[in-house]
Image (cartoon, helix red, strand yellow):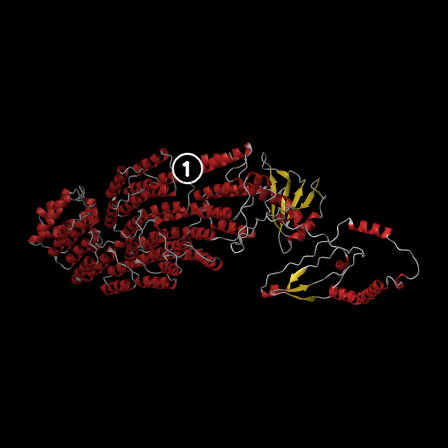
Amino acid sequence: MMSTSSEAAPAPAATVIPIDDVARHHGKAPAVATAPPPAASSAAPAAAAAAATTAAPRKTGLPFFRRADRGSRCVALVDLVLRIAAFGPTLAAAIATATSDETLSVFTQFFQFRARFDDFPALLSPSPPPPPPPPTNPLASKLWLSSKLSPPPPPPPSRQAIQEPPPPPEPEQEAAPLRQEDFRHKGKVFVGNLPLWARKPEIAEFFRQFGPLEKVELVRGHDDPERNVGFCFLYYGGDDPEAAAERAVEVDGVEFRGKSLTVRLDDGRKGRARAEDRARWVEAGERREARLPWHKGREEACREFRRVLESRPENWQAVVSAFERIPKPSRREFGLMVVYYAKRGDKHHARATFENMRARGIEPNAFVFTSLVHAYAVARDMCGALSCIEEMKSEGLELTVVTYSILIAGYAKINDAQSADNLFKEAKTKLDTLNGIIYSNIIHAHCQSGNMDRAEELVREMEADGIDAPIDVYHSMMHGYTIVQDEKKCLIVFERLKECGFKPSIISYGCLINLYVKIGKVSKALTISKEMESCGVKHNNKTYSMLINGFIHLHDFANAFSIFEDMLKSGLQPDRAIYNLLIEAFCKMGNMDRAIRIFEKMQKERMQASNRTFRPIIEGFAVAGDMKRALDTLDLMRRSGCAPTVMTYNALIHGLIRKHQVERAVSVLDKMSIVGIAPNEHTYTIIMRGYAAVGDIGKAFEYFTKIKENGLKLDVYIYETLLRACCKSGRMQSALAVTREMSFQKIPRNTFIYNILIDGWARRGDVWEAADLMKQMKEDGVPPNIHTYTSYINACCKAGDMQRAENVIQEMADVGLKPNVKTYTTLIKGWARVSLPDRALKCFEEMKMAGLRPDEAAYHCLVTSLLSRATVMEGSTYTGILSVCREMYENDLTVDLRTAVHWSKWLHKIERTGGALTEALQRIFPPDWNSSENLEASNSVSDGDSESCSDSDFSDNDEDHDIGDH
């Protein structure tokens, strides 16, 4: 405890010692320790000094030992000694307090104080005066005037009623100011004072020496986009882009193409300006700053371009003009233009637009590259598409699921399912998820190639991944089953489509119509057509073309033209595909003048003729033997801008083969070599078919060897032609060798292969081999058609087993097949062979009752069979053949000269002196049948030739495929 006297000098200002509460670790509230206010005012020191001066004692001896003041002086002396004695401990305590933490021995009921001193000079230096105590009401000074005008506030409530008000909300902290350094791009470099003609590759080549460049942004001018404005931005990458940028800055001032470059690091000014603009835009809401007239004009041109692109895509001139009116197209406009050309399959203009974009300094992104790949894929140029992919990878862009989908769809168009499958597997390994579109494209690729097992496996995989199959997958599967002619599974997919909630569209019904047209059930195709109309789905040109094509392949031209008239009544206008079918129909009818008029009508309507237009015309003139007009049509094709292809020459060769001019057809190969067109496997197959028709199996195998030597693809049609040559010449062992090679090449047998083999054994009358083939055919799952059963019946008739033939007719009825005219003609020949003319006549009547109209071959076969196996006719047979002759006369049917000579010879054995039968037959004979030359010719005809007219080759007519089918 320290005390001060009144004579002492004024004490220095008290030092404020900061106190921190030790009890905060125990959950106690802190206490505030304040220093006492100063005791003396500022005038006290001056007054004390004056008093000391006036009251100073005289200096005489020792003042302490005077008697009068002895008591007080002793007390002062003791006080001095005590002060001196206390000085040492006080100084030690002060030093200890300044260098260590001390807990004061002062306690209250709830608090314990701890004083902490970190700086000893603070004890000696005077501390600033404490702040004045806060006013009781902080708003009193502000409300001083109002307090005068209003009554005074009520007295404060008692302590019990006082409740602490909730703490006021903390004021929001102001956002820190945007620092320019925060927006600095570490690898970005500004390059100024560039030559106006400098190109991006030149700049990149110069600055690539300092580090890996990610991109170069060369700024182009508004007025002249072909030239830059004198500066660019570099973006370095790699492990340390900042170091590369710093090395690039060291070339500041270096001369480049005659100019001194200005190279600076990115200072973040541009990024900061963008952030501030964005902040102002957000703060101002929807209000935008006024733009320059140039920008307004550019935006208007871009909107006009997009409007034309959406509303008039078919008018390519309007689209190109709208694009060219844009002053400075951006990546978006260039990308839309590439997409437009891609949809049209115009790969050349798509590539030109792409290169124009890069020349303007706009780097393409993944979308633009994908659009360019799409253009090549639509144009069926997959080599060009793959080159775009390599270029895309060199730019560091990854393939997306859309890119993979487009590539797979492109390979599906060229029927390369293996390449499409490889791409799909690559997409599965590189992409995290796949969508339904890429699955739809790969399934379509396998369906297009007829690999339905792989297509079904992909469908199961898609369902296992939880991806819902779009309706395109159902259509692809139906199309695949149409190609392999699996009617049952195609109908299952159609029913499943409806069960899954999809409404059958025109494509769904079109797949069914196409299926029945391909398998020859055009009547069922018409039923599907009526069902489609009843469901409210209208026909389009595609469905009508399918029906017309089906009737044309059946040579039912009347119904084909009837369908065409129905299409015109529905309000649809014929397109190029319809006109091509009409031209093909007239050419097959031999009416070449009408075909030429249809072609001229196409030209008047400004329809571009294609190879499909010219092929049937060239083939028609070749079949008619008018090679001059065929070659003139070939020249017209060249003048029309349609270059002849190998298929065009195949049509010319095919026409000559149908006219049995095999050697002339072979000479066309020399013309092909002159114009630089190499024959393909179909060319050699057509020539092999010609040699097979004349029975020259050696020449057929010679061209088969050429196919192998040239590395051409072997398909089922080539082996079909070889088998036909072997079977027609009766060399069935060679035919078996061909079938073994087919198995070695893993080429499955189809219905046509089995038909040729069964027909070959039927020619030899070997019903047991034919029966084994029928059994094997069913085991392989190959559906027999009407020709298969007709050939089998022919084998039974040749063997004289008419009971088996009757069983085959019943089996046909069980599977839903009805006998045709050829089937009844074969049965008639069989019944006549076993000397049952009544059954033959009965079969003829059954054919007419079934609604079939006998053709000339049926009449010829019936009369020939009856006349050749009877010397004296019975009454019913005699009456029947008379009625047949009257029918032929009423239908204006006459026989040729050779047949007349044959019948007259057999008639002479029956009626030597003439009669009613002779008179009836002579009415259908040609007028000069009994001339001397003809009688001499009849003597040279052997009896064995009588059977040639009835042993018709079913495979020649039914299996004569169109060259475009394969």
The front one of 961 and 876 is: 961
Extreme-top residue of the structure: 293
- Give me the residue at 48% from left, 53% from top: 400
- 820 up-or-down from 61: above or below: above
- Give me the residue at 48% from left, 35% from top: 322
Assess disc 1: are there few (<14), some (14-19) or many (≥20) residues with their C-alpha within 10 Å of its C-alpha.
few
Residue 911 % position (x, y) = 9, 50
Q: In this rendering, would 841 be left or right of 785?
A: left
The front one of 112 and 118 is: 112
Q: In this rendering, would 812 be left or right of 842?
A: right
Please say whether residue 209 is visible from this viewpoint.
no
Residue 875 % position (x, y) = 6, 53
Q: Secondary structure at mark 1?
A: helix
- Give me the residue at 35% from left, 40% from top: 576
Q: In this rendering, would 580 be left or right of 123?
A: left
In what quadrant of the picture does the N terminus appear? bottom right
User: What residue is pinned by disc 1?
Assistant: 311
Residue 648 % position (x, y) = 39, 45
Q: Amino acid at mark 1?
A: Ser
Please say whether residue 338 is visible from this viewpoint.
yes
The quadrant in which residue 616 appears is top left
- 751 up-or-down from 615: above or below: below
Extreme-right residue of the structure: 61
The front one of 564 and 800 is: 564
Extreme-left residue of the structure: 875
